[in-house]
């Protein structure tokens, strides 16, 4: 799959809650793990890009990826969500979860 993103860095080398992902173009970025959401029998991971502290954005954008198993290694791989409706529904569940935590 061209849209597979693999976690290539051993987790013990990164701060807790931070994962490093390498995309199909070989670009590596660090993300903060926010949560895992179940939707229609599938699991999705919600991440936020770890920005440079010099950038002054009030809120970061979240990335939603579907969790699948690599058939060759049986390791988790994260796949882009192409279906905008599914992406929106998972995002809505994430927002509802965040609002419930604030109460």
Image: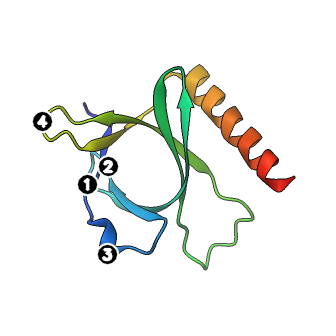
State the image quarter where residue 37 is shown: top right
Please indicate whether residue 102 sits to the left or right of residue 16 in the image. Answer: right
Q: Secondary structure at mark 1?
A: loop
Task: Please state the horizontal and vertical placement of residue 64, each as a whole percent of the image.
Answer: 52, 41
**Residue 13 has which mark?**
3
Marks 1/2: CA–CA distance: 5 Å
3 or 4: tag closer to the N-terminus: 3
What residue is pinned by disc 4? 72
Label 3–label 4 contact, CB within 8 A: no
Marks 2/4: CA–CA distance: 18 Å
Query: Residue, x 19% and y 39% (percent of image)?
Result: 74
Label 4–label 1 contact, CB within 8 A: no
Query: Tag 4: Cα neighbours inside 10 Å, few (<14), some, or many (≥20)?
Result: few
Label 1–label 2 contact, CB within 8 A: yes
Query: Tag 2: Cα neighbours inside 10 Å, few (<14), some, or many (≥20)?
Result: some
Marks 4/1: CA–CA distance: 20 Å
Q: Secondary structure at mark 4?
A: loop
Query: Residue, x 63% and y 73% (percent of image)?
Result: 55
Nearer the camera: disc 4 or disc 1? 4
Please indicate whether residue 52 sits to the left or right of residue 98 in the image. Answer: left
Query: Residue, x 46% and y 71% (percent of image)?
Result: 16
Nearer the camera: disc 2 or disc 4? 4
What residue is pinned by disc 1? 26
Q: Secondary structure at mark 2?
A: loop
4 or 1: tag closer to the N-terminus: 1
Q: Secondary structure at mark 3?
A: helix
2 or 4: tag closer to the N-terminus: 2
1 or 3: tag closer to the N-terminus: 3
What residue is pinned by disc 2? 23
Task: Please state the horizontal and vertical placement of residue 34, each as a whole percent of the image.
Answer: 57, 54
């Amino acid at each position: 799959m061209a849209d597979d993103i693999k976690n290539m860095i051993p987790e013990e080398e990164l701060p807790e809650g931070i994962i490093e992902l390498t995309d199909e173009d070989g670009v590596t970025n660090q993300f903060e793990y926010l949560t895992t959401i179940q939707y229609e029998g599938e699991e999705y991971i919600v991440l936020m890009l770890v920005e440079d502290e010099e950038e002054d954005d009030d809120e970061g954008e979240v990335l939603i990826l579907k969790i699948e198993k690599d058939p060759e290694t049986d390791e988790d791989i994260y796949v882009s969500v192409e279906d905008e409706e599914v992406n929106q529904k998972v995002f809505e569940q994430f927002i509802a979860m965040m609002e419930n935590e604030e109460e």
